[in-house]
């Protein structure tokens, strides 16, 4: 029997306590502290965190999550040391290559969110290959937020809309139309956002999309995060009453 279910019909409300969210997003915090506590360079923490990402992504796919979004590199992360930034770029290339190679067999679709103009021609080609393959795959979609910031995403979306409006390609703006210009166009908002590492803040992540998301904070550092804790976060979500601004 599956641990979680997707309730439907007259029993949906009663089943909601263990209902499965369609979309889980994660702020992967704690890689650097994990490495420092072990006397290792921060890059070793990011490598360990990348392995945790693989493990958690497969677990989310296996339990039936439709969309899994990770905050891999923010627009603010450029302030870190050149060594750390270089290591993160190397990891991106490594895992893009691996993802493109296995995505069909593992039933994973890929989406990159964020300003991708910085990518090297090689990484852009890999990303394009992954996006093209994703069109033909029926499975969980993994959204990788790289060089991403919530405010930056909103500004880029506003610029795209303004250009289309001036060109006569867009009508009067409303929430639905604006959402179609975001990096997340066509993706449902996350019901659950998990932040590891003990911090309790949004950190410029999915600012538009998190309007009614539920947050789950844990002290566990990302490299130590396990599938069992994903399950606990989902169970915690199921115990919450989500009213979306309505009265109780």
Image (cartoon, grey):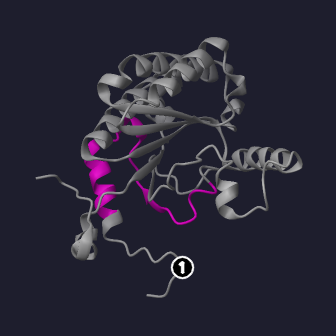
Q: Range of the magenta residues? A: 207-236
Quarter assignment of residue 108 = top left
Residue at 85% x, 49% y: name it.
Answer: 168
User: Which residue is the site of mark 1?
Assistant: 245
Q: Is residue 226 visible?
A: no
Residue 154 horizontal side relative to residue 11, left or right: right
150 to 130, vertically: above or below? below
Position of residue 2 measured from the top left corner of the image (x, y, whole percent): 16, 52
Position of residue 13 measured from the top left corner of the image (x, y, whole percent): 28, 75
Of residues 89 and 219, the one nearer the viewer is 89
- Circle 1 — which element? loop
Outermost residue to the bottom? 247
Residue at 43% x, 33% y: name it.
Answer: 109
33 to 185, vertically: above or below? above
Position of residue 137 measured from the top left corner of the image (x, y, whole percent): 38, 31
Of residues 12 and 138, the one nearer the viewer is 138
Instruction: Work out which quarter of the rendered image holds the C terminus and state it.
Output: bottom left
């Amino acid at each position: 029997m599956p641990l979680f279910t997707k309730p439907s019909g007259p029993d949906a409300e009663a089943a909601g306590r263990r209902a499965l969210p369609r979309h889980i997003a994660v702020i992967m915090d704690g890689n650097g502290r994990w490495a420092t506590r072990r006397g290792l360079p921060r890059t070793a923490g990011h490598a360990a965190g990348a392995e945790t990402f693989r493990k958690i992504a497969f677990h989310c796919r296996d339990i039936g999550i439709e969309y899994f979004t990770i905050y891999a590199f923010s627009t603010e992360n450029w302030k870190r040391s050149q060594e750390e930034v270089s290591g993160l770029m190397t990891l991106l290339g490594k895992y893009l290559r691996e993802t493109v190679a296995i995505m069909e067999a593992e039933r994973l679709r890929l989406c990159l969110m964020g300003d991708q103009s910085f990518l090297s021609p090689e990484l852009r080609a890999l990303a394009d290959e992954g996006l093209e393959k994703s069109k033909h795959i029926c499975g969980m979609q993994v959204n990788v937020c790289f060089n991403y910031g919530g405010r930056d995403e909103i500004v880029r979306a506003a610029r795209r809309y303004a250009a289309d409006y001036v060109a006569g390609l867009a009508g009067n703006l409303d929430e639905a139309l604006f959402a179609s210009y975001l990096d997340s166009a066509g993706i449902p908002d996350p019901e659950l956002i998990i932040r590891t590492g003990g911090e309790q803040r949004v950190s410029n992540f999915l600012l538009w999309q998190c309007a009614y998301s539920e947050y789950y904070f844990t002290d566990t550092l990302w490299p130590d995060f396990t599938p069992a804790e994903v399950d606990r976060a989902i169970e915690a979500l199921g115990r919450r009453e989500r009213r979306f601004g309505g009265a109780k």
